[in-house]
Every structure is written in C-alpha cells, then in structure tokens.
C-alpha cells in the first residue's frame, strides 16, 4: 500500500495540529490526527455552493461570502455559479490553508484563488460577517464540521444566536445563508427559523451519486 506523505503542518490559534497529507491522487487535511476533509469527498461542498448561489447567479454584481477555504471546492463551485461581474469573498483563518491552496492543492479545484473574482481575507469569518452589514447576496459557511465545532471551539459562535444575528445582518434583502454540516441538527434548524429564516434541509452524499457518508445542508432564506 502506498504510504501517506506529509506535505504541510500548521496549528490553529487554539493549538489544534493541522496536517496536509497525500497518498497517490488522494489528499487529506487532518486535525489532531482526525480526518477533517478529503479530496475524494467533495460533492456535498459543491452542492452547498450550487444551492446557496441559485439566486445570486441571476443578479448583477452579486457578492458571495465563502466561510472556510478547505480544499477550494466550495469556492470553485461558487465561482462557477455566479456571473462574470460577481465578487466571491473567501474568509480563511489559517494562512497555511491559503498557502496549500496556492501550492499542492491548487489544481484540485482548478486554481480558484487565481480567479479575478476571488477576494481572499485571511481572518476569522466572524470578523468578515461583523463588518459586512448588508454586503452579501449569499453566505456559504463550510467552517469546521458545521454547528458542532470540531477543530476550533470558537467556531461554535458562528452558529449560535449571536452568530445567526450577525449573518442575517450581513445579508442583503432576500439573501441566502447556506451551512454545511457533517450531521443533522434540529436545534440549529429551529434556531434559523427563530431568526427569521425560511429553512430547507438537504441530505446529500459526500460524493453525491457515487455515495459516501451523508451530510446535511441547511438553506436559510430571508
């Protein structure tokens, strides 16, 4: 069996060890040795962007926020789902993840960071939301494992009451909040409704028709 090759290492602000590894054509990012994301399970991330950008694709000069760069699949799908005059802001906390996406991971999603519509903000997505009152037509949150934080405890603040109020304030009228989650979360679904979102949930396979574990996509519309 081909061994896993270590390509990069970094630590999150709270000390979680992040590693980028490769085995053959497969790439994986781990958090403290646990699988966080894999290059062969990208379908649900792409579906998040497709659903979240459905309305934005019809707008002139649409502005979309992608929270969490990962391996670039959500960003690529968002770029593919909006017009040539759109702006897609990607907020990523870890400089190393941005560097990996400019380096060994760049080809996986077709070098989305080189698209002129992409604006990279190396910062906590919460800061981008906090300063973005009425800025975005769609917000795509693919941070951690969803409402149940996995790598960074502070990520839970994106999905609590204060976080949803912040996201709602950052959306334009009729804006859309799309959230990726590794699991169902009825409490989060109810929380979205409590803050005035019309909610849909979609259960999708990680590799869509090719199977894989089921993930949950929350779609909240104003």
Image (spheres, grey):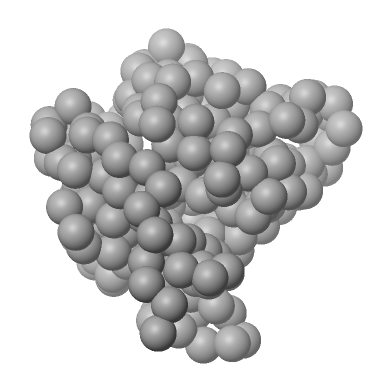
- Residue 52 horizontal side relative to residue 80, left or right: left
Query: Given the current orientation, which residue lies at the most extreme front position?
Result: 2
For the residue pair 97 and 170, the one nearer the viewer reads as 97
- Position of the N terminus, as image quadrant, is bottom left
Vertical arrangement, residue 157 with respect to residue 210, above or below: above
For the residue pair 76 and 140, the one nearer the viewer reads as 76
- Residue 200, position in %: x, y? 47, 64
Vertical arrangement, residue 43 with respect to residue 190, above or below: below
**Mark count:** 0
Q: Is residue 188 visible?
A: yes
- Residue 117, position in %: x, y? 75, 27
Q: Is residue 65 visible?
A: no
- Residue 116, position in %: x, y? 78, 24
- Quarter of the image for residue 164 reads top left
Residue drawn where x is 56% and y is 23% of the image: 120
Query: Given the current orientation, which residue lies at the most extreme right position?
Result: 84
- Quarter of the image for residue 165 reads top left
Vertical arrangement, residue 113 with respect to residue 200, above or below: above
Residue drawn where x is 61% and y is 60% of the image: 46
Residue drawn where x is 19% and y is 59% of the image: 33
- Residue 195, position in %: x, y? 32, 41
- Quarter of the image for residue 167 reads top left
- Residue 177 horizontal side relative to residue 159, left or right: right
For the residue pair 106 and 87, the one nearer the viewer reads as 106
Residue drawn where x is 70% and y is 41% of the image: 111
């Amino acid at each position: 069996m081909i061994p896993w090759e270590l390509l990069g290492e970094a630590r999150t602000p709270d000390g979680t060890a992040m590693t980028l590894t490769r085995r053959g054509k497969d790439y994986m990012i781990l958090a403290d040795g646990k699988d966080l994301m894999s290059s062969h399970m990208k379908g649900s991330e792409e579906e998040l962007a497709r659903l979240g950008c459905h309305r934005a694709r019809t707008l002139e000069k649409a502005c979309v926020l992608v929270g969490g760069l990962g391996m670039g699949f959500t960003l690529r799908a968002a770029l593919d789902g909006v017009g040539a005059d759109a702006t897609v802001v990607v907020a990523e906390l870890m400089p190393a993840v941005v560097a990996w996406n400019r380096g060994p991971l760049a080809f996986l999603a077709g070098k989305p960071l080189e698209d002129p519509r992409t604006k990279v903000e190396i910062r906590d997505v919460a800061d981008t939301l906090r300063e973005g009152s009425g800025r975005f037509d769609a917000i795509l949150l693919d941070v951690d494992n969803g409402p149940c934080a996995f790598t960074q405890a502070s990520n839970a603040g994106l999905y609590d009451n204060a976080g949803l109020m912040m996201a709602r304030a950052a959306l334009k009228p009729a804006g859309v909040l799309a959230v990726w989650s590794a699991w169902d979360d009825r409490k989060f679904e109810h929380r979205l409704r409590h803050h005035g979102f019309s909610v849909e949930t979609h259960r999708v396979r990680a590799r869509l028709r090719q199977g894989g574990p089921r993930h949950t996509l929350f779609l909240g519309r104003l």
